[in-house]
């Protein structure tokens, strides 16, 4: 049994090792590319999506994660690169597809809900400081009171001139304040 410089013990180990790489799709073609690779049994595709008050949208617009063995990644590079809707495979200057850490993909998957979506309502929690990034209250900082309502809005409490002011705002209009 030979041990190679990269730590693998045999050629079979190299073929069995799977890594995540990133496909960049043409704008708005993520679902087409995802469906194509889901039909192909030897590719494991991951397309993280975010649910917000505007509906469902990609967490990383125009990017998908694909898990394939190292040997298949090189052998099927043309199939990955020239699939319908794919713009390119993220790779080094030498054309070698770059891999993404499995821990990064696992962390994203852990944050998904049971329905398979990252719910924007879970990002904001009561008591957190938020800053308004859009609208007439832009740049005001307040405290999140209620994380969500049926209208997909958040109630924020501001202290203005010794009086509390409450406002119902959209998720997209807020950013968390780093303390």
Image (cartoon, rainbow, N blue to C red):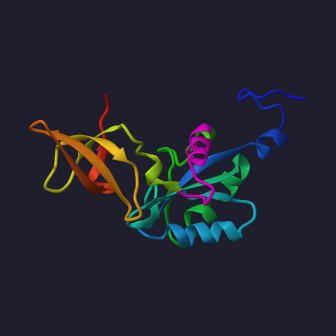
On the image, the x and y values in percent for residue 26 come to: 44, 67
Q: Residue at x 35, y 37 (%)?
A: 128
Count of labels shown?
Answer: 0
Q: In which quarter of the image is residue 28?
A: bottom left
Image quarter of residue 33: bottom right
Furthest toward the front, the residue is: 163
Looking at the image, which residue sits at the far right? Answer: 1
Q: What percent of the width, then of the height, locates residue 45?
A: 63, 58
Q: In this picture, is 37 found above or below 93?
A: below
Quadrant, the C terminus = top left
Nearer to us in this view, 79 or 150: 150
Instruction: From the viewer's perspective, tell me whether residue 14 is left or right of residue 162.
Output: right
User: Left or right: 92 with respect to 159?
Assistant: right
Q: Where is residue 80 in the image (x, y as percent from the top left)?
A: 60, 62
Q: Residue at x 40, y 45 (%)?
A: 124
Residue 62 screen position, x and y as percent: 45, 61
Residue nearest the viewer, comparing 91 with 27: 27
Read off the magenta span. Answer: 103-117
Q: Is residue 48 above or below residue 14?
A: below
Q: In this view of the protein, which residue sits in the foreground, 104 or 54?
A: 54
| Lateral position of residue 36 relative to residue 91, left or right | right
Q: Is residue 129 above or below residue 5?
A: below
Q: In which quarter of the image is the N terminus?
A: top right
Q: Does 7 appear in magenta?
A: no
Which residue is at a point 37% across and 65% down the rendered structure image? 151
Q: Which residue is drawn at 71% across and 54% down?
A: 72
């Amino acid at each position: 049994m030979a041990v190679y410089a990269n730590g693998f013990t045999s050629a079979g180990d190299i073929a069995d090792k799977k890594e995540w790489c990133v496909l960049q799709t043409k704008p708005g073609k993520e679902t087409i590319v995802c469906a194509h690779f889901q039909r192909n049994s030897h590719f494991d595709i991951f397309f993280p999506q975010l649910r917000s008050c505007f509906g469902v949208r990609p967490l990383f617009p125009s990017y998908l994660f694909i898990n394939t063995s190292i040997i298949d990644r090189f052998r099927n590079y043309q199939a990955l690169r020239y699939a319908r809707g794919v713009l390119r495979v993220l790779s080094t200057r030498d054309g070698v597809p770059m891999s993404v850490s499995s821990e990064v993909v696992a962390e994203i998957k852990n944050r998904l809900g049971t329905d398979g979506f990252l719910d924007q309502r879970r990002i904001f929690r009561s008591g957190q400081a938020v800053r308004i990034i859009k609208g007439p209250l832009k740049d005001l900082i307040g405290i999140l009171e209620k994380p969500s309502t049926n209208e997909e809005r958040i109630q924020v409490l501001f202290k203005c001139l010794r009086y509390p002011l409450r406002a119902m705002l959209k998720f997209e209009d807020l950013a968390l304040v780093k303390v």
